[in-house]
Image (cartoon, rainbow, N blue to C red):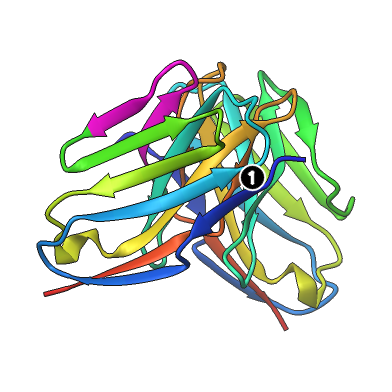
Amino acid sequence: DTAVSQTPKYLVTQMGNDKSIKCEQNLGHDTMYWYKQDSKKFLKIMFSYNNKELIINETVPNRFSPKSPDKAHLNLHINSLELGDSAVYFCASSQTGYNSPLHFGNGTRLTVT
Amino acid sequence: KQEVTQIPAALSVPEGENLVLNCSFTDSAIYNLQWFRQDPGKGLTSLLLIQSSQREQTSGRLNASLDKSSGRSTLYIAASQPGDSATYLCAVPSGSARQLTFGSGTQLTVLP
């Protein structure tokens, strides 16, 4: 199936740990994104990558770092996890261009205890 | 800074009704507006994308309109079905890197 897939679906970890979330798309898109959805369901952009270059970076803590080994993958690494990092993280992809719709993965629910 | 608002936050209707979801945005200099659907525990599914030069887009029972000058969009759902129950979000690209700014969504429940 053509899709945006991210793993794991659920991630429960303790404060202070380091964790990664993986994302892959086989849609041939050249731009990938990470969004965070908080407990109030607000979706906010975190990062996007275009042709292996970071093109936007919202004011997220530098404990969060995106890693893109190729244009089909954009992984999210989080160091020294904090309680406030608990949220659902969504990966998405699109073609370059303002009128290209975004395709989202099913999300990773991160719970920090 | 672009702000997107969706009203109502929740809506419950009996099956078969036609309904309208509203979305407003503060900065009318947009390239497009997208409507998404989110099912519980799932990601977002793109429903319709209206380009700034368009007034409306249709897909099946869904019709989205865009009025840039007034900063408003509506999503019309005809003959609603229980399977339409989901959260509907609108979003507009903003900033030089076209990051999407989302509304907080309208949670729709269609009662059988």
Q: Is residue B65 magenta?
A: no
Picture residue at 16% right of the left edge, 43% below the top: B61
**Is B13 placed left or right of A95 in the picture?**
left
> Which chain contains the residue that carries disc 1?
A
Q: Which residues are magenta?
A: B46-58
> Where is residue B5 drawn, in percent x and y?
58, 53
The image shows residue B40, relative to residue B92, as above or below, that is: below
Quadrant into which the N terminus of chain B falls: top right
Picture residue at 56% right of the left edge, 28% below the top: B69
**Is A8 placed left or right of A21 in the picture?**
left
The image shows residue B73, relative to residue B84, as above or below, that is: above
> Where is residue B106 drawn, in percent x and y?
43, 62
Count residues near mark 1 (Cα–Cα under 10 Å), then give few for <14, some for 14-19, many for 20+. Answer: many
> Where is residue B86 drawn, in percent x and y?
33, 63
Judged from the image, the secondary structure of the residue bearing numbered disc 1 is strand
Picture residue at 45% right of the left edge, 46% below the top: A5
The image shows residue B50, relative to residue B107, as above or below, that is: above
- Please tell me whether the stretch drawn in magenta is mainly helix, strand or loop: strand
Picture residue at 22% right of the left edge, 34% below the top: B59
Q: For this rendering, which residue is in front, A77 or A59?
A: A59
Total tally of numbered discs in the picture: 1
Q: For this rendering, which residue is in front, B73 or B80?
A: B73
* Residue at the farthest front position: B70
Q: Is residue B51 magenta?
A: yes
**Is A103 placed left or right of A15 in the picture?**
left
- Look at label 1 and name its amino acid: Trp
> Where is residue B19 drawn, in percent x and y?
25, 56
Q: Which residue is mark 1?
A: A34
- Quadrant housing residue A12: bottom right
* Residue at the farthest bottom position: A113
Quadrant into which the C terminus of chain B falls: bottom left
The image shows residue B63, relative to residue B110, as above or below, that is: above
